[in-house]
Amino acid sequence: MLTVGATGSGSLDYQWRRGVTDIVNDPGHISGATTATLTLTLEPNDAATNYNCVVTTSVGCFSVTDEVEVRAGATPSLLSQPNDGFACMGQLVQLSVNTPNSFDTFVEWRRGETVLPPDPNHYSTTSGPNVRTLTIFDLRPADIGNDYNVRLVDINSSCEVITDFFSVSAGEPTITDEPDSIAVPAGGTAQFDIVADGASVYQWRRNGMPLSNGGDIGGAMSTTLVIMNVELADAGDFDCVTTSAGGCQTISAAATLTVDDAAPCYADVTGDGQRDLSDLAGMVASFGLAAGDPGFSADADLDNSGVVDLSDLAGLLAVFGVPCP
C-alpha cells in the first residue's frame, strides 16, 4: 500500500505510475490507481524502484512525487517440519527446522505465541546450511511441553509461516505408586511394591546399596521385592531405581522396613511377662469358647485350634510359674 498526501486549490486528481507509465486498476491485484492510496496484492513482477504519483489540481497544475520502491518479498518456505525433542532431565536436547538460507528471513522460536526470552545459560539458537537449531543445554521440568513452534518472517514483505507444534519430553519413568514402609516380626516376610509408568528396568536398594536375588531375597530387579525370614540385619530404608528404555532414571521414595524381634511369650495370656494365676484366670474365663464367641480370647488359644480347651490348659500348666524369657 502506497499513500500520498497533497494539498492544493480545488479538487485534486491522482494518477499512480511506474516510471512514466500510468498504472490501471486490475481487480484482485491493483486498486486505487487514481486515488491518494494505491493498493497492490503483490506479485513478483510488482517489485520496482520507480513508483510515483502525479497529483493535479482543478486548474491543471500538477506535481510528481519522488519515486519509491516496492519490494515483492516471498513467504518463507520450509524444507521440513521441526523434530520433537527427547532427553533425560539435565541433558542436552536439540530441535531443528529446515528452511532455505536467506538473509531476508527472521526466525523466532516460541512456546505457543510467546517468544522464548534470551537465556544464554540455558539455551541458544544457531543457523547453519538450510537449518535453524534450538539447543537446550540442560533439560528442566519447565521445558517440557508440546507447544513449541517456529515463526519465519520475510523482512521485505512481512509474510510469515509458522511451523506445526512440536514437543519436548523427558524420558524419565513416572512413579505412580511408591513403596510403603512396613513393620514385620522376625522370621516373617517383607514385601515392597512399586508402579512406574515408562520403566523397563528396576533395581531395589537397601540403604543405597543394590540388592541381588538369592537366599531369602527375591524380585530385586522387578516391581515386587520379597524378603523372607527377615532378621534384624534386614531392617533399613529401601528404594527402587527405575530406568526407561532410553536410559533415564527415576528413584522412588524410601520405604522403611522395621523388624520386631520381640517374640510373644508362650502362655502369657495377660501379657504381663509372667505365667501365673492371672493367666490361668484368663484362660478359665474363655474355656470352652470358640473363635467368634463373645468372650473368646485368642491369647488363651495356645494351639491356635480355634477353641480354648484342655490342650491349651495343659500347655499353660506345663510352664506355670516359669517367668517369660
Image (cartoon, helix red, strand yellow):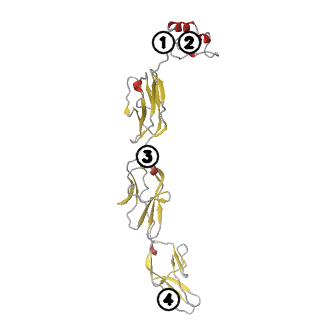
Give the residue at x 50% y 88%.
Answer: 63
Amino acid identity at mark 4:
Ser
Q: Residues within 10 Å of mark 1 (few under 14, many from 20)?
A: few
What whole-number distance in Å separates the C-alpha atoms at marks 2 and 3?
63 Å
**Does residue 251 appear left or right of residue 24 in this picture?**
left
First of labels 4, 3 by sequence position: 4
Question: Vertically, is 38 above or below 276?
Answer: below
Q: Which badge, 1 or 4, comes first in the chain's sequence? A: 4
Residue at 55% over, 9% down: 312
Which residue, given by chain and number where applicable, does mark 2 sit on? 279
Disc 4/disc 2 C-alpha distance (Å)? 125 Å
Q: Earlier in the sequence, mark 1 or mark 3?
A: 3
**Please, what secondary structure does the residue beneath circle 3 have?**
strand
Are the residues flagged by discs 4 and 3 in contact, CB closer than 8 Å? no
In the image, which is nearer the foreground, mark 4 or mark 2?
A: 2
The residue identified by callout 3 is 170
Helix, strand or loop at disc 4?
Answer: strand
Give the residue pinned by disc 4: 63
Give the quarter of the figure containing the C terminus. Answer: top left
Are the residues tagged 2 and 1 within 8 Å (C-beta)?
Answer: no
According to the picture, the residue beneath numbered tag 1 turns out to be 323
Would you say the residues marked 1 and 4 are in contact, meaning their CB atoms lie under 8 Å apart?
Answer: no
Q: Is residue 225 visible?
A: yes
- The numbered disc on residue 193 is none
User: Disc 3 residue type?
Assistant: Ala
Residue type beneath disc 1: Pro
Q: CA distance from mark 1 to mark 4?
A: 126 Å
- The amino acid at mark 2 is Asp
* Residue 113 located left or right of residue 88: right
Q: Residue furthest bottom?
A: 59
